[in-house]
Image: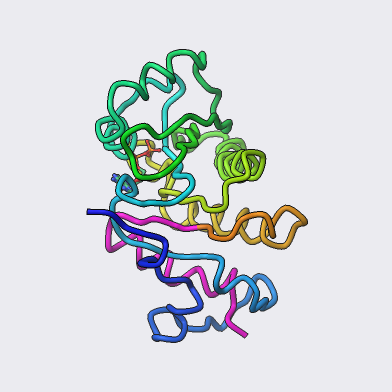
Amino acid sequence: MLVRLADIKTIGQLFQTGVLKAAAKHRYNANAGFLDRVSLFQGDITVMEVDSIVNAANRSLLGGGGVDGAIHSAAGRKLVEECRTLGGCETGESKITSAYRLPSKHIIHTVGPVYLRSDLETRAQQLESCYQTSLNLAVQHNLKHIAFPSVSTGIYGYPIEDATHIALDVVRRFCDSDAGSKLDRIIFVVWSNKDKEVYETLIPEYFPPQ
Ligand code: ADP
């Protein structure tokens, strides 16, 4: 099964159909231009036919569990061979590879922080940097779409609400920046119903419809 860009609803469409509802509290002003450039999609990131998908990797970049394991097994052995040449990646940083057998063109591997209750500010900055450095790489490589899983919120234990605020805040600020116009679509990919609900609740605060 393949998921094409045309199959992925924009947040504008999700507002229209009532899946997303305007929030009482707005963290940013409305900007109608963003409504067709941001998406929320529930499903498997490995079947998405988009320019780039983000992998929630570990510092070795040699594969692991969760979404990382799914991406490596679907992409095939050539992915780990390319990853071996990269010399790992620091927490909060991102590196790009080909996507091999995946329908996407590239994989952007980002290393999220392991959530520990100490030094929360550093963890938050690292998670913010995962999203920012991934967006930067997509722009540098002239890629027009990027699909993000919910980095650090699986095995790495980052609370989903806190992580979603960070993801939405970085993406909204990116959309407002000069580089924002370089990407046609930024897709938040959720796996579980719970994560979908969190995104549905918080997206209207960052991307108000009006
Ligand atoms: P981390 O180690 O950064 O916490 P995980 O892979 O454990 O990364 O989890 C990150 C998120 O990816 C979780 O929300 C998890 O449910 C989700 N996830 C797992 N498999 C997939 C997949 N195939 N497609 C999209 N998201 C996935």
Whereabouts is ligand 1, in terms of quadrant? top left
Q: Does the magenta stretch include residue 202?
A: yes
Please provide percent x and percent y for residue 87.
51, 13
For the C terminus, the quadrant is bottom right
Residue drawn where x is 59% and y is 69% of the image? 206
Is 55 on the left-hand or right-hand side of 154?
Answer: right
Answer with left or right where residue 204 lies relative to residue 34.
Answer: left
User: On the rendered image, what quadrant is the N terminus found in?
Assistant: bottom left
How does the figure colour the protein chain or chains?
A: rainbow
Q: What range of the chain is rendered magenta?
A: 187-210
Q: Would you place residue 50 above or below residue 105 in this image?
A: below
Q: Which residue lies furthest to the left in this view?
A: 1
Q: Residue at coordinates 51% horizontally, 17% vertically from top-left?
A: 86
Percent across and percent down for residue 48 are 35, 51
Q: Position of residue 117 (x, y in %)?
A: 48, 38
- Please report the residue visible at 38 percent of the width from the left and 51 percent of the height from the top: 49
In the depicted view, which residue is nearer to us: 155 or 136? Answer: 136
**Side of 82 where 133 appears, left or right:** right
* Residue 26 on the magenta segment: no
Q: How many labels does the image show?
A: 0
Residue 169 vs residue 193: left or right? right
Residue 8 drawn above or below residue 120: below
Foreground of the two, 114 or 46: 46
Question: Is 84 placed above or below 2 here?
Answer: above
Q: In this view, does 147 lie above or below 156?
A: below
